[in-house]
Amino acid sequence: MSRVVMLVLGAILGLFVLFTFLLPLLAGLFKIALIIGVVALIVFVAVTLVGKSRSSQ
C-alpha cells in the first residue's frame, strides 16, 4: 500500500515540477532564441543591402 502511495506522490510531484519549472523555462529559452534569430536576420539583410549598394557604385 505504501508503495502505491509513494508512486502517486512521486507522479504528482513530477507533474508539479514539469509544469511549474521546466515548461516556463523552455518557453523562455524559445523566446530568447526567437529574438536572437530575428535580430540576426535584420543584421544579415542590412549587411547584404549595404554590400550590394557598395558593389554597384
Image (cartoon, rainbow, N blue to C red):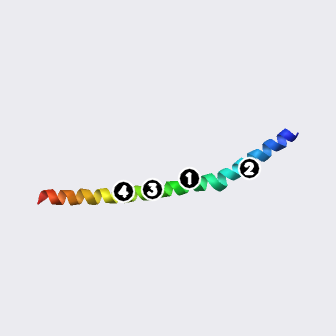
Q: Which residue is mark 4?
A: 40
**Distance from the alpha carbon under mark 4 to that under mark 1:** 21 Å
Residue 35, located in which quarter of the rendered image? bottom left
Which SS class for mark 2? helix
Amino acid type shown at disc 4: Ala
Amino acid type shown at disc 2: Leu
Coordinates of residue 18 in the picture (x, y in percent)? 66, 50
Q: Which residue is mark 2?
A: 13
Above or below for 18 versus 49 = above
In the image, is 2 to the left or to the right of 10?
right
Q: Which residue is mark 3?
A: 34
Above or below for 35 versus 12 = below
Amino acid type shown at disc 3: Leu
Q: Tell me, yes or no, whether the two marked residues, 2 and 4, touch with CB atoms within 8 Å.
A: no
Query: In terms of sequence position, does the residue under pointer 1 or pointer 2 come before the other?
Result: 2
Coordinates of residue 47 in the picture (x, y in percent)? 26, 58
Q: Tell me, yes or no, whether the two marked residues, 3 and 4, touch with CB atoms within 8 Å.
A: no
Residue 51, located in which quarter of the rendered image? bottom left
**Distance from the alpha carbon under mark 1 to that under mark 2:** 19 Å
**Distance from the alpha carbon under mark 2 to that under mark 4:** 40 Å
**Distance from the alpha carbon under mark 1 to that under mark 3:** 12 Å
Coordinates of residue 25 in the picture (x, y in percent)? 58, 55
